[in-house]
Structure formats: structure tokens, C-alpha cells
Amino acid sequence: MRLYSKYLAITLKAHLQYPGSFFLLTISQTLFPLSMLVGVHGLFLRFGRLGDWTFPEVALCFGVIHLVFGLSECFSRGFDSFSLLVRNGEFDRLLVRPQSTVVQVLGSRFEFNRIGRLLQGLLVLGWALLNADVAWSVAKGVTVALMIISGYCLFTGFFILQATMSFWTIQGLEVGNILVDGGRELAQYPLSIYKDWVVRFFTWIIPLGSINYLPLLFLLDRSEGVALGHMLSPLVGVLFLIPCLLVWQLGVKHYQSTGS
């Protein structure tokens, strides 16, 4: 953790060398997703509801997914740009250092200007929690915390899997963005608005629903007899990180230098 903290401090200091650029990028990262939500709100003003969902309930989904994606963009971006380390031969240096390659890759890049997405997700989530029809309890507070923690783990796992592909392909593949960006766009709305096979796929195969949709049902008292399961479903996002790290270690063992 000490090494990771040093990486954070150095990167933040570098970003603040150009404070004007940093703050403008942060503001733009905040306003763009908010403009999307304003458009959605306009549709709710016209049609009232989205299936069984009110606007604060949809905003709750929207806020959670953008908050956890913002966290992963800020603090796990090293894996998203990992293919550059492979092409340049820089990963060879990481292998000879007496530190975990996971920590070193995490620390190779932080995107603090993406904190704008994190902040807007936090603002939307806070507003939604105050306006949605949630009968608060300790269990529901724990559920919200689990949604955030496990959501960060889930998207970090996606970044790790995308980075691991670079051991064999050298170049980064855009197909990974289908999972990351596509998953974010899909999960910012309650999954029940999609076809049944979409709900099943993004709950049991790619567990986006486990960190967002299922716990949302628990928060809104729509669990119908499986409340405990829906409350604990975000833990799937944390567990998802374990096989991702195992796949990463497999990729490291099969790594062959590019010779750069």
C-alpha cells in the first residue's frame, strides 16, 4: 500500500502541474454524463415511467454504475493502457522489480481528470437515494456500500481481462470495450426493461446485474422472498476479481518480450 500511495501522490502532482487543463477536463467529464441524464429526465416528463420504474429509481441505477465506473477509470486505468507497456518493452522492467506486477501496472497510470465522472455519479446517486422510495435500514446501507465496492472490483476485473489479452495480441483490442463501455451503457438502466435473455446473460454470465439490478430490487423492497440473496448479490463482483487475477498470472507466465 505504501508503494501504491506513492504512485498516487506522484501522479496527482503531475496532473496539478497544469491545473487549468486538469479542472477543465474534470468539469467536462462531469457535465457530459449529466447531459445524458437530463435527456432521460425529459423522456420521463413526457411519458411518466419507464415500465415499472420511476425517474429517481432509474437515477439510482445510473448513479451507481457511473460512480463505480468513474472509480475504476481513476484508479485502474493502468490496465486499460497496458498494451502500450507491452509494445514498448516496458513490462520487462516491471518483471525484474521485487514488487507485484498488479500493483505496478495499477500505479503506472491514474486518470485523476476522470474524477469528474466519479463526482457526477456520486451527486446523482445521492439525489436518487434521497428521492427514491427507500425504507432505510442498516442492511440497505450496507447494500449500497457493497454495490460501490463490488462495482469497482467488477470493472477493474474487466480491465484486467482486457489487459491480459495483450500478452498474446500485443495490440490492445477494441473488443474489450464492448464489455466495459457497452456494459456500462446497458447497466445504467434497470435490466428488467430488456429481454429476458439479456437479463439472464448480464446477471449470471457477466454479473453486471448482480452489482446493480438485483440489489436495487432489495433497496426498493421488490425482492419477493429472496431479499437476502439480492442483498448479498454484489459480493459476486468481488469474487469476479479472483479469476481475473488468476488469468492475469497465467498471462504473465506466458509473456514473451517484444524485444523493444
Image (tube, grey):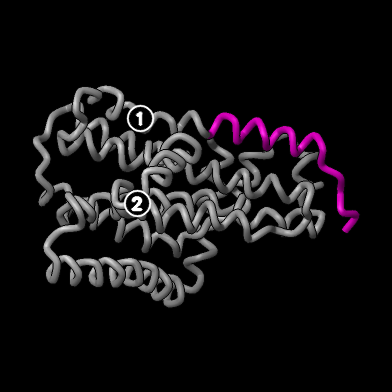
Quadrant placement of the C terminus = bottom right
Magenta stretch prevailing secondary structure: helix
Query: Which mark, by number, is residue 233?
Result: 1
* Between 17 and 44, the one nearer to me in the picture: 44
* Between 248 and 206, the one nearer to me in the picture: 206
Residue 173, percent from left and from top: 68, 58
**Residue at 33% of width from left, 42% of height from top?**
212
Residue at the disc numbered 2: 194
Q: Which residues are magenta?
A: 241-260
Q: Is residue 189 left or right of residue 223?
A: right
> Is 246 a magenta residue?
yes
| Up/down of 215 relative to 74, above or below | above
* Mark pair 1, 2: CA separation: 20 Å
Q: Tell me which numbered mark, 1 or 2, is placed earlier along the sequence.
A: 2
Task: Give residue 54's quadrant in the image.
Answer: bottom left
> Is 240 a magenta residue?
no
Residue 227, percent from left and from top: 23, 25
Q: Is residue 53 left or right of residue 240?
A: left
Residue 178, percent from left and from top: 54, 57
